Amino acid sequence: MAVMEKQFAYGVAGIILSVIFLLVLSKSQRGSLCTLLPLRSRCRRISSSNTPPRSLSPAKKLPANMPSPVDYRDICPPSRRESLSKVAESLPAGQKEKLQGREVDDTAFRKGIIPLTANYREYGPSTYTPMEISIEEVKALGDFPDYAELSGVPLPEAYNEFNIDKAIPRPYRPLRWAYHQTMSLTKLEPDWWLELESRYTSRVAERKELVKKYGKMVLDYLPGSELASKEIMEMALQFLCARYPQYFSLSKTEAEGHVFHNAILKTRTVINSMHPLHVILHNIPEDFAIMLRNPDDGLYYFRAGLLCSALGWNVSTKLGLALKEIHAPIPDYKEKMEFSMDRYFAKMPTARPIQRGSWGLEVDKPLFMPPGDPHEKYRSLQDPDLTLDRIHLRVDWQTLRRLPLSGAIVFNFKALFTSVEDFREEACVPALLRKVLTEGKKNMMEYKSTWHVEHLVLPKLEEWEREQVEKGLVGKNWEVRTLDESPWFPGWEKKWHDRQGF
């Protein structure tokens, strides 16, 4: 269990927010983080030149152990309230009137930011979200507003040829050499935020059983998360309807309100009949963690989550904690990481969601493994009776985005499993993985916790590496490095299309 705690300490409870820290930081990024994004603060007036305050200039490096000089109460995330007028154009006159031509007084905004634990439905026009949008405007937008316009992230293109019975995930191989390079942070591909595959039905059923069995260990929410939960649910359903119109649609009746129709599961979900996270649970087999800004200190707290894919920890032990509290077990986090992480969260814009992948090697396909789970025993020994066909690459494909109305930051990911035997025909992958496992930094390999399967995997990787050179798949003098196709591999698209048939 100690190994698992160490491996998953990097995050909102092990995976969640550690991955966020892996998502956004590398050695080079930490030095330049203050210049990555323009800071447009509306909690205080600053120069329109978008230059960071002098105290935060990257040219004036702070001592590693120096407390942050920033009062985050004065820093609100970049607003897109200018999008309200455009969204209002398609709304009825009564709603449009409340959304167009309104100026926000900075003093009124600063004094009226909604408390962390407050339900937005109970507040009126003098209260604002951190995005400089009044609660009256939020209510005027109604249900399922145009989130593409509000966020600046376009809806996906329709994937009309998609067949759920044949679909397989894209073959993510987020392997890198060497580990001192950047963290493979990339801009989110709008078409691939939520990716479905042929195990959709069984995965949704499995996750519902996990919630039934473990309850608040995997799904829970605190007061104040109502707007963000509604927002991410509506954005996710809009995505599904746009990306897979042959399977999903939304309707609205006076009696029931909005209804989500799922042709794969042959279900209809009355949106207002259940909590937004339960709507997601019933229709989207991915995990979501919601971080909210606390106006009392300007920092971000884990306030709601649906997390059925965690190994070695559970939601109930981390819910309600601040980012720095979640990362407290990480060595040197306070001295070296806390300032940069808090600053990144403070100014991340809605129009720049990001993605990356993390990986590990697992016996079988464990999805959720709470402390004390019998599956833990596989990580403590090299089982001589273990067979190669039981060993899988687990990739957690992750995204991070800010919501345009609540200002919440949402981390989401899906767990994908691939048999290591697939690597035999994937050019360069055996050599790259072998390099990482045998020459990677000791602390990184301990974090990966791959020792329990290396006695089987390494000999096969060496064999396949030689085989690929002999077949001409890999050049004899190829120097192992991160692939140009990363997070995939040469020829991945043909293999993927051939396997699924479209």
Image (cartoon, rainbow, N blue to C red):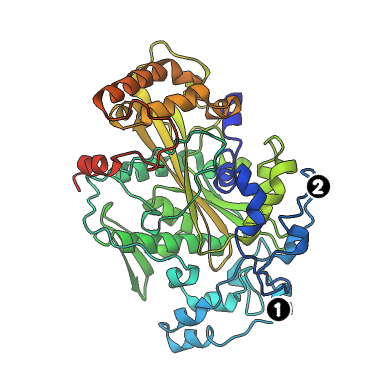
Foreground residue among 398 and 352: 352
**Quick check: 55 left or right of 400?**
right
Say if residue 232 shows up in the picture: yes
Vertical relation: 162 (above or below) 127: above
Instruction: Decide: is 14 above or below 256.
Output: above
Q: Residue at x 39, y 26 (%)?
A: 431
- Which x, y percent locates residue 138? 54, 74
> For the view shown, which residue lies furthest in the front direction?
477
Provide residue 151's location: percent of width, then percent of height.
49, 67
Q: Which numbered disc covers residue 66?
A: 2
Mark 1 residue element: helix
Q: Nearer the viewer, mark 2 or mark 1?
A: 2
Q: Residue 153: horizontal and vertical position, in percent?
A: 45, 65
Q: What residue is shown at x 61% (from left), y 45% (from top)?
A: 28
Residue behind mark 1: 106
Q: Position of residue 502 (x, y in %)?
A: 20, 48
Quadrant position of the N terminus in the picture: top right
Q: Secondary structure at mark 2?
A: loop
